């Protein structure tokens, strides 16, 4: 494709638009845009992980908001392990129950989960499993009751 650029010369100067290195269109035009009806794609793995956790938490909150009460959800890269921690095991999440006016805090650790996941589908299944099991523990019910997508082990 070529554009004609009119300059000071009498003959138009031809400038070619090129697909540099054959990688396709780049930049903001190639990314999603809300006004065009396409949601913006996450820019980093961290953003994609946060979006995944947010989607799952939103589904769980819609079903269990009346029983959960005030719960803060967070994503951290790695857990802070004490010096006497047993080697060979790393937690995937942390649940600290609230008391009084202090809300319950559920933290998902991104790097340990990503390290165990083989692909995107595996990552989604692991995040779902971790969140559902923590919410089930908080509510005192079976994980399969929290979310119908929870894998049935039977």
Image (cartoon, rainbow, N blue to C red):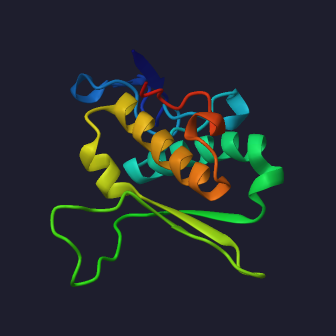
- Residue at the left extreme, as displayed: 87
The image quadrant that residue 60 belongs to is top right
The image quadrant that residue 56 belongs to is top right
Question: Which one is in front, 59 or 42?
Answer: 59
- Residue at the right extreme, as displayed: 66
At 68% from the left and 36% from the top, the residue drawn is 34
Residue 99 screen position, x and y as percent: 70, 79
**In the visual, does 20 lie left or right of 100?**
left
At 76% from the left and 40% from the top, the residue drawn is 63
At 28% from the left and 82% from the top, the residue drawn is 82
Question: Which one is in front, 119 or 148?
Answer: 148
135, above or below 142, in the image: below
Q: Quadrant of the C terminus?
A: top left
Question: Which one is in front, 50 or 42?
Answer: 50
Residue 15 screen position, x and y as percent: 36, 26
At 15% from the left and 68% from the top, the residue drawn is 87
**In the visual, does 122 lie left or right of 32?**
left
Q: Quadrant of the N terminus?
A: top left
Q: Tag count in the figure?
A: 0
Residue 54 screen position, x and y as percent: 60, 48
**In the visual, does 28 lie left or right of 135?**
left
Question: Which one is in front, 147 or 142?
Answer: 142
- Residue at the top extreme, as displayed: 1
Residue 142 screen position, x and y as percent: 59, 41
**In the visual, does 46 lie left or right of 88?**
right
């Amino acid at each position: 494709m070529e554009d004609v650029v009119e300059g000071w010369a009498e003959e138009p100067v031809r400038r070619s638009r090129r697909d540099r290195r054959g990688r396709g269109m780049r930049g903001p035009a190639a990314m999603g845009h809300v006004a065009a009806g396409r949601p913006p794609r996450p820019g980093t793995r961290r953003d994609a992980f946060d979006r995944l956790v947010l989607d799952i938490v939103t589904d769980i909150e819609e079903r269990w908001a009346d029983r959960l009460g005030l719960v803060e959800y967070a994503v951290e890269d790695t857990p802070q392990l004490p010096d006497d921690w047993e080697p060979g095991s790393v937690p995937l999440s942390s649940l600290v129950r609230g008391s009084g006016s202090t809300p319950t805090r559920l933290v998902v650790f991104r790097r340990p989960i990503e390290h165990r996941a083989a692909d995107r589908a595996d990552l989604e299944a692991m995040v779902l499993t971790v969140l559902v099991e923590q919410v089930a523990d908080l509510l005192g019910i079976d994980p399969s009751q929290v979310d119908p997508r929870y894998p049935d082990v039977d």
